[in-house]
Amino acid sequence: MKPRILITSRLFDESFAALERECEVIRPDRAPFTPETAAPFLPHIDGLIPTQAFRVTREVIDRSPRLRIVANFGTGTDNIDVAYATERGVVVANTPDPVVEPTAELAYGLLLAAARGIVRLDRGVRDGSVRVSVMRNLGMTLRGKTLGIVGYGRIGQAVARYAHGSAMRILYFNRHPLTADRERAQGVCYAPLDRLLSEADFVTLHTPLTEQTRHLIGARELGLMKPTAFLINTSRGGVVDEGALTEALRAGRIAGAGLDVFETEPQIPEELRTLDNVILTPHAGTATTEARVEMGCRAADNILRFFRGEPGITRVN
């Protein structure tokens, strides 16, 4: 009997051709499945491919007695109760490879847009409020500025490669610092978080959301940043205390921010929407056609390898 797999969102067909040859695949026709609309299928599924919007809670796992693997469509697994899945003997996997470059590209794009005021200038040209003048519309040159990277995994390292192209000085903070040889090879320098925040002209966040990193950047940390500095977040909204950030932006305690993620997605606080010194994007870090196809392929591959008994699953538990 073929394993039965539930995919919670409508994704690119080409990602799942191989999966559909070997498994019985349930996919939504239009609207994504929610735990409520998926309820009739849960008792009968052997595998699950959820997106970030679908929360794999204890209740979902309990209602899925045949479930053996959750192959998350994405890298972060804060939408999954991994501890309970582990307790129940359910494998959890993710798709780390396809997300690296597109997320790094967006982070660097937000950084550049913030430095040069690209979004503000675009709005001004459209509504006629911007005038051409030698002493107007001034931004910040990246060359020679300091970039602080919080979380120096694969995405953080990819951002560093882009920043080297702008001749930026790079500090990084990570739980496990690199060796001195690797730092020299990558042209970066480790700094404790407080020092990084106080020296950086741009701070970009690339850490997963855990109990240890929730509100890692709060009022105290924002107070350490330069008033001319910018904060970029393409990791998870909960890494930043959104209320403290809003107040810092409103009061001009930092120059601005570029945010792709928010604490209560998909809702974005109205206070942030009204501020001119913040650029907002809708959790689009991996939103390229190529990345979405590759993410689906990797999630499907995790399922296939699991049921074939093959190695190479990108497990998180």
Image: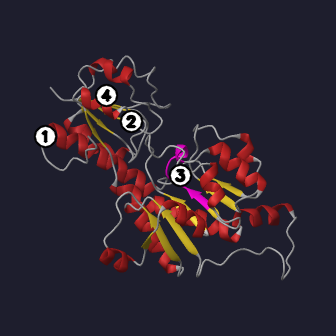
Describe the element under mark 1 as helix, strand or loop.
helix
Disc 3 and disc 1: Cα gap in Å?
33 Å
Q: Which residue is mark 2?
A: 50
Residue 234 belongs to the span the image colors magenta: yes
Looking at the picture, which amino acid does disc 2 mark? Pro
Identify which amino acid the numbered label 4 is placed on. Tyr
Q: Nearer the viewer, mark 4 or mark 3?
A: 4
Q: Measuring 58% from the left and 59% from the top, which residue is drawn there?
A: 232
> Left or right of 117: which side holds 168?
left
Q: Residue at position x 39%, y 26% from top?
A: 57
* Residue position marked by numbered label 4 in the rendering: 84
Which range is magenta? 231-239
| For marks 1 and 2 on the same chain, the one whose residue lies earlier in the sequence | 2
Q: CA distance from mark 4 to mark 3?
A: 29 Å
Q: Earlier in the sequence, mark 2 or mark 3?
A: 2
**Callout 4 secondary element:** helix
Instruction: Please indicate whether residue 11 sits to the left or right of residue 181 in the image.
Output: right
Sort mark 3 into few (<14), some (14-19) or many (20+) by Cα contacts within 10 Å: few
Residue 284's tag is 3
Ranked by sequence position, the earlier of labels 4 and 3 is 4
The local secondary structure at tag 3 comes to loop
Q: Which residue is mark 1?
A: 308
Kind of residue at disc 1? Arg
**Residue at 32% from the left image edge and 45% from the top image edge:** 94
* Residue 141 place in picture, x, y as percent: 65, 78
